[in-house]
Image: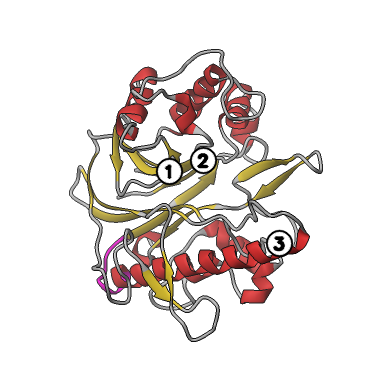
Amino acid sequence: MRIATYNVEWFNSLFDDDGVLLNDGGWSKRRDVTRAEQTAALGVVFEAINADAIMVIEAPDSSRIRDGKKAIEAFAAHFGLRTNTALIGFENDTQQEITLLYDPAKLTVLHDPIGGDTGPAPRFDTRYALDLNVDAKLDKVVFSKPPLEVALKTKGGNALRLIGVHIKSKAPHGARNEQDAIRISIENRRKQLAQCIWLRQRVVEHLKSGESLVVLGDFNDGPGLDEYEKLFGRSGVEIVLGEEGDNCLFDPHARQVLSKRLGAQPVTSRFFIHQEDRYLSALLDYIMVSGDLRSKAPKWRIWHPFDDRQCYQTPKLRDALLTASDHFPVTMDIDI
């Protein structure tokens, strides 16, 4: 089977409040891209990756006035995708849901959150107490986008646990000056690491229970990504992966960066920096697996329009990847 994670920038803006696809010439929220252009590009990308299950990050909003499940299923129907059924977990207030789009002929899935209001790893829609400021006082940490916990079964009866994540961004949004940007960046880094510690505790629970686990999504972080990592000792990605030994997860792209800080590195996103008139590339999206799944020799792929040979040599797909989002899909093929 093929499992994917894909952060779709401003997916929500392609639908009206009734979940109808706005496939027209109006501007999308992507720079110099119309809604029709982004919609068509996304159709090309989703058809090309042809996954059995896609963890869509920044999926259409679900709220009192919008139905994200209806919207993304309308998108799938428009392009005749076999991944035509959506699963949404805890709704959030950011207009960016975490949604699993899957093929119901191949898979059975259930939103299956675990954990109570207390304990080492409370449920992801509650609060987590942690001393963020090293002042001997517990701070209350929350997920603005609670991870999506999925109990999945394949048609052959194999069971997997999936956790779809969109970890907090470290960007200093709202900063008025350089000093303010530093303060906000450090504060956001603390919150980001706290979310990763919370997630890591849930990971350990699953691994100790002997469950097959996949943690996937956008971590807004990676080894060596910014200077604040030196202040805190390690990245959030390293926290979730765990130390070498028991109860560890594996992602080959994270391992590559950790083992070789210099030279060419894998990237999954490409952002335009207006102030500098250039693009910034970063490794932000991961598919992490438990040891039993790693032993099955899965194959990972970043669908990068320039770094992946097949993508680059297919102009229609290459252009679609650049038009559809500021992130690129990551897939994993595994025999299960």
Mark 2 sits on what residue? 329
Residue 256 position within the rendered picture, expressed as x and y whole percent measured from the top left: 61, 61
Label annotation for residue 180: 3
Point out the tag, 3 or 1, that comes first from the N-terminus: 1
Point out the tag, 2 or 1, that comes first from the N-terminus: 1
Residues under numbered marks 2 and 1 in contact, where contact means CB atoms less than 8 Å apart:
yes
The one nearer the camera, 193 or 46, is: 193
Residue 289 position within the rendered picture, expressed as x and y whole percent measured from the top left: 40, 60
Q: CA distance from mark 2 to mark 1?
A: 7 Å
- Position of 30 relative to 98 (above/below): above
Crowding at dot 1, Cα within 10 Å, few <14 / some 14-19 / many 20+, comes out as many
- What residue sits 59% from the left and 46% below the top? 268
Which SS does the magenta portion mostly show?
loop
The one nearer the camera, 175 or 125, is: 175
Question: Along the horizontal axis of the image, is 38 left or right of 149?
Answer: right
- The magenta segment is 207-212
Q: Amino acid at mark 3?
A: Asp
